[in-house]
Amino acid sequence: MGKVLNIQPVSRIEGHARISVHLNDAGNVDDAYMSLMSLRGFEKFIEGRPAEEVPRIVNRICGICPWMHHTSSNKAVDGCFDVTPTPTGHKLRELLQVMAHINDKILHFFFLAAPDFVLGPDADYSVRNVIGVVKAAPELATQVVKMRQLGQMMIDRFAGKAIHPIAAVVGGFSKPLPEAERQAMLKDTQTLLDFGLFTLDFAKNNVFNKYLDVIGELGVIKTGFLGTVDRADGSFRIYDGKQRLMKPDGTYVDFEGDDYLDYLGEHVEPWGYGKMPYAKSWDEGFSLDLENPKGIYRANTLARINVCDQMATPKAQEALEEFRSAFGRPAQATLLYHYARLIELIYACERTLELLNWEGITDTDVRAKVEPKAGRGVGIVEAPRGTLIHDYTTDENGCIEKANLIVGTTHNIGPMNMSVKQAASALIKDGNYDQGILNKVEMAVRAYDP
């Protein structure tokens, strides 16, 4: 008789989810789903609020990446009020967002993903966790904790809060960067860059080369990709640029953020709570069928390095060239999200150094004059988990009339379900499964860092 295997909770992700694997009478997979509770209340919470308050509210959406919601929201309100931030205010926003990416990459790779690779996906679950990593590699674990603390404290010292920030404001930034603080941040960022380069080498030798067979098979699906690129040369960007929507064959179209509704639609399946964005401009409809998916694209790290023409910093570009020589463009293997994440870690460190060395970064003109008014603004940044869209409309008093949010993880809800089904179908045969197999199904979700 058929049965349902429930993996609940999915472990080592930044949230809560359940995987349900439906077996038929022969013990093979009929279907598989990833279920999550997705609160869409913030779109209603902020209606009627003065728009300048909203960036301090929506940063509560996520305690892991509040800076991304903070900066995206400020960009949206800039659009509503038709204000252009000062050059220094613009750069300070990017600086803090890029710095937040550094800490997020370290967190995910070492705390959440590493146990599967350092200890092995079949290791007992009682030790297959960050504590197990600490015991297996205590010196490395100590260094990881120090580096993450260093990154967090850099943000905390300058911006006042590393979590749930308030430092960015409509029209720019709330305070200038003192020269002494800039010098300290330069030194600390170089330390983080050195650690990022070490991390990529460590991962290539101990993860990616060691687990090539698993990478080439587990959760692999064929989809399109979405990310942000530089308007001038198509290089990698995470704070500002144009959106690039790439089909599975590598062809793509670029568009400005204000026009996202012409390219992306939002779908909800009856068995799920989260909305599933899809590429409506492909005129395919929506389908999660593994053999013939329709309208499905992915966001997040692998998507961003697939859609960009090149990285915008030298060490990250070297890493991208090596990646593409091994896996091509666009790369489709789901576990390569981990590899892409470390390329982004290097970029984030290098870009932080570039911004700190920009000649105007300590200028005191950090905020443009703002007058509340009626308008519409779309703020888009790249959050660690994908393209983050805040879309607001304000009334004549500058209060929010309507809001639509597409949060980074939601782009990947559909693809995660596809990867789960692919992994479960490939691994569970004739009713045979164990904890190691079920963990590998979880790994297909964990790669997306939802």
Image: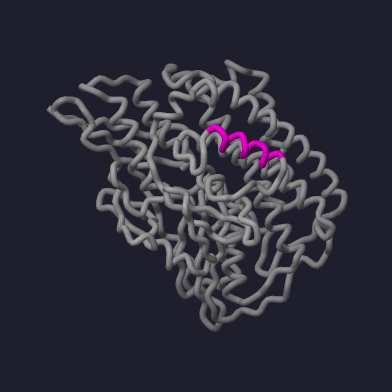
Quadrant assignment for the N terminus = top left
Give the residues in magenta: 315-326
Q: Nearer the viewer, residue 120 or 249?
A: 249
Taking the image as shown, residue 182 lies to the left or right of residue 382, namely right
Find residue 251 and report its horizontal and vertical position in percent.
47, 53
At horizontal 27% and vertical 33% (from top left) the residue drawn is 21
User: Which quadrant of the structure image shows residue 166?
Assistant: bottom right
Is residue 314 toward the left or the right of residue 45 in the image?
A: right
Nearer to the camera, 250 or 271: 250
x 63%, y 57%: residue:
230
Give the residue at x 21% y 28%. Answer: 28
Q: Is residue 161 above or below residue 437?
A: below
Q: Is residue 321 magenta?
A: yes
Residue at 73 percent across and 57 percent down: it is 92
Nearer to the camera, 192 or 312: 312
Q: Position of residue 139 (x, y in %)?
A: 68, 19
| Most frequent secondary structure within the magenta stretch | helix
Residue 409 in sight in this render? no
Magenta span contains residue 196 = no
